[in-house]
Amino acid sequence: MPGTTPQPTSATRTRSWWGWGWADAHPDDAECAAMGALIPGTLAHPLPVPRVRDLGVGRPAVEPPASLAHLVATGPEERAAHAMGKAYRDVARALRGRPGRIPDLVARPTDEREVADMLDWAGEREVAVVPYGGGSSVSGGVEYRGDAHRAVLSLDMTAMDRVLEVDAVGRAARIQAGTLGPSLEDQLRPHGLTLRHFPQSFEFSTLGGWLATRAGGHYATGRTHIDDFVQSLRVVTPAGTSASWRLPASGAGPSPDRLFLGSEGALGIITEAWVRLQARPTHKASASLAFTDFHAALAAVRAIAQSDLAPANCRLLDAGEAALSGASHDGSAVLVLGFESADAPVTARLGQAVELARSHGGRRGDVDGAETADTDAAVGAWRSAFLRMPYLRDGLARMGAVAETFETAATWDRIPGLIEAVRTEVGQAALKASGHPATVNCRLTHVYPDGAAPYFTVLAAGRPGDEVAFWDDLKAVASDVLHRHRATITHHHAVGRDHRPGYDRQRPDPFALALRAAKGALDPRGILNPGVLVD
Amino acid sequence: MPGTTPQPTSATRTRSWWGWGWADAHPDDAECAAMGALIPGTLAHPLPVPRVRDLGVGRPAVEPPASLAHLVATGPEERAAHAMGKAYRDVARALRGRPGRIPDLVARPTDEREVADMLDWAGEREVAVVPYGGGSSVSGGVEYRGDAHRAVLSLDMTAMDRVLEVDAVGRAARIQAGTLGPSLEDQLRPHGLTLRHFPQSFEFSTLGGWLATRAGGHYATGRTHIDDFVQSLRVVTPAGTSASWRLPASGAGPSPDRLFLGSEGALGIITEAWVRLQARPTHKASASLAFTDFHAALAAVRAIAQSDLAPANCRLLDAGEAALSGASHDGSAVLVLGFESADAPVTARLGQAVELARSHGGRRGDVDGAETADTDAAVGAWRSAFLRMPYLRDGLARMGAVAETFETAATWDRIPGLIEAVRTEVGQAALKASGHPATVNCRLTHVYPDGAAPYFTVLAAGRPGDEVAFWDDLKAVASDVLHRHRATITHHHAVGRDHRPGYDRQRPDPFALALRAAKGALDPRGILNPGVLVD
């Protein structure tokens, strides 16, 4: 409209090299200071936005081969932007001018042949290859550590960003791995179809990244992970290209796709996949309920998860999380329920779920517990806080504060004790290490008939100047609690490098043997994302 | 009741060593002859029921170790009963007195320690270990072929047959691998819970067998395979025992359980699993619809599979299959729909599915197309024929006829052409090889938004005296059709030894490399079910 400011588009905006998302979406100094003032013990002034030129990025240790040079960037800005993912500890390191090892080269292959050529060249030269999609890893998945390789190549897949084929009858599409979430949905929209995979990182993550990390998506129940949407995969390995058949299901031996799903670049480079799509939902309904008693809310969620109702959204925020996102301010926990369908109205299903929740003490409606029909406020408040959160986290990091999340999953019998132990032990560890009390909140993001996935948010003053070690200490405490409660080290954030100790304790030893042998067969020179999953 | 004949129970009945199920349930000579008379070109008189004493079973090539001898049977009856599975080709071989290699020993361990001890001993002595559950393999999964090992041990797991633990809150149970279907459900019943996994072999197959072969279960949509019900596994391998954590979901690396699911005993011996249970359904409703046009029926099934309706049963019988099972006699295809829930009535969902089917030309009701409310006749006729089928198959085999099935899965775009090609090419091959026309029928057993699982029945006069080669020829033709149409070599009957050629062509080469390496790491002496999956 005339007179309005044009909205920035992805073509005109710049990605932050050191923090989440778009550089122009970060809170400014005043906002950072205002946020920091809410947390006793933070810095008086925000740390400056870090600059690449202060890093003293050196010359690459290797030259790209002439035949591939046109695909390779060697400038400091590009290389710094590919040095790390977007975890709090990555941001904190960047803010202190100590990012992870800067890759020597950033390559952007445009087809599978070029990916294979890159791997061939890297194998000959002992160059580590770290696959890179949207770069939103929060577990150290896209960062080289150590010095066992001559050089490091960041293999940025985002030039392979097309939907190649759509099967409208069988509702599936063949999509290149480097396709970012918004582009993927834009390309499917003309077909009336959607993948409906919306992780928090949607804007800044790719199909290949989702597949390699077993990302959690849109659905709170049922098909919670991208795994269930995979029909077939193409994966380039140093030992050849693996291409599975498009199949709706198969019982022919262990699933080939399931070996590559979650392989985090350690077994090969996923180049494309056939994925299952859905009609766009036309019926939607949502509601929120407040609970005075968190344990009653847990029982309600379990009852819903064990019913046939299959909500698309079933998110339980504890009191702290509800307050933080503006969904409640009276100490209530809040359950947000959402149903959707392309077929038929969902209000009846919503009604049944609400009744189930009420039978466990849930109060329909607004934050004060009044019964109202309009619950969009709580739902909307939650969604907007959800997408804004990583930017605020970076703003708080500039104040020396820790704002970080981690997630897990466990069976129902362990859920109450697990949540309590994480709150208590991480809170105590933060207090002891910083002298200031910390906030540890919890929400359930995905629920199952047999368990749930708690997602924790930690807000703490930190130990200014020593932020990374402070966080690593808290994370070690958290990981110990998870291990003691037999809760997985990650439900959908991948293992990367940060979760290796917890992962190594969790996975069965014979499986580790098998995985190491598989890696040895597919990546005999050990160039693929070294340090991830196996050594 | 006084005066009635007591029903035989599993304690008093004898399993057939050469054919399906209970020895006393097999059709007698007169019934066999009557069936044979329906198929031109079969034998005039049934082949005699084979006797173990005619096999000339020799002495075992090895002695069991003294410490384990009490677990080991060496008698000819036991060993012959463990020589093969229950495919048509197994029955045909037994009828001609040429069964597969008779194992030297049959061991029945009672705990995990004894399983490990057996593997240790077998590894030292170069004895092949073939795991055996209910023995209902129809793909050569429980049979040793070749002579690369000094001796063969059939590891019968059925002494490990208990439900060890039930988590009523999280609806899960820890169950030993050797538990047969009926016993498993009997042990769960007092808890009001059920696994609801009912393959056709239910009575004669075990949890461990289902897991090792990725068995197809009760549900026609959604969670069609046992895979989705697995919380954790314990697997004894020569390299140690793999024990995964009980988790509702995880994103920590490739799934350890998914490597062992479908591993068919080649990577280890599954000893127990935590599996997800459900409340017993209290609401059920079913209906059948007749279709004049099979392609219209396919479109109806696809529409239902792509809806939210999630029928528990959605079985489409083509005209021949419908006639064979008594569900229709007018050349109509029949769609049998079933819904169930432990929560709420399902009549509305059934009604919506029926409406969808009618909008594609389905006629509600009886075989003649009249509209009736009672459709139990077609449903009941189908179910009883389904369970009786393997016994009839063995009766026909005694007449020299081939009655066998095979199944696959493919995406919707390939389904019509695939079904047509199987019917035509297998039919032509049978005619050419035997001089008699054959019947090739098809049903869809499981349906998905993106495809379906066709299940084929072949009825042919065979080539008396040369039955096995005749069937192998037909199966090779069928496998070629599947390969050409990129349909999986098996949807839920496992690879075993019979499907190896198709499997080897289907699986990606790099995955084969990885699997072989994994096997090398877990089973360095190659004693575990040699010939299955990898060489």
Image: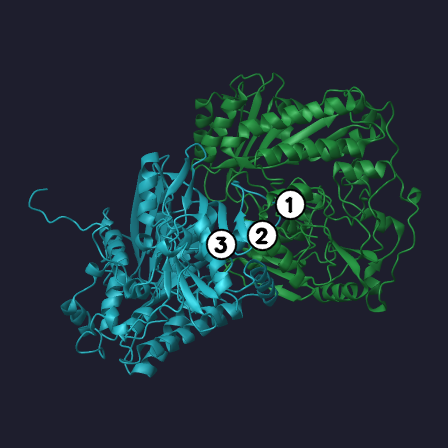
Chain colours: A cyan, B green
Nearest the viewer among B122 and B512 is B512
Reading the image, the residue beneath label 2 is: B511
Element carrying mark 1? helix
> Is label 3 in contact with label 2 (beta carbons under 8 Å)?
no
Q: Residue at x 29, y 66 (%)?
A: A76
On screen, residue A294 above or below B226:
below
Q: Quadrant of the N terminus of chain A?
A: top left
Reading the image, the residue beneath label 1 is: B504
Q: Are marks 3 and 1 on the same chain?
A: no
Give me the chain letter of mark 1.
Answer: B
Task: Give the CA separation, mark 3 to mark 2.
Answer: 13 Å
Give the left or right position of residue A42, taking residue A122 as reference: left
Which sits earlier in the primary sequence, circle 1 or circle 2? 1
Give me the chain letter of mark 2.
Answer: B
Give me the chain letter of mark 3.
Answer: A
Which amino acid type is marked by label 1? Asp
- How would you rate the neighbour count of disc 2 (Cα within 10 Å): few for under 14, some for 14-19, many for 20 or more? many
Which amino acid type is marked by label 3? Leu
Reading the image, the residue beneath label 3 is: A261
Mark in the foreground, 3 or 1: 1
Which amino acid type is marked by label 2? Phe
- How would you rate the neighbour count of disc 3 (Cα within 10 Å): few for under 14, some for 14-19, many for 20 or more? many
Q: Residue at x 76, y 64 (%)?
A: B123
Question: Would you say residue A79 is visible in this rendering?
Answer: yes
Image coordinates of residue B523 in percent, x first then y, are: 69, 61
Image coordinates of residue B325 in percent, x first then y, are: 66, 26
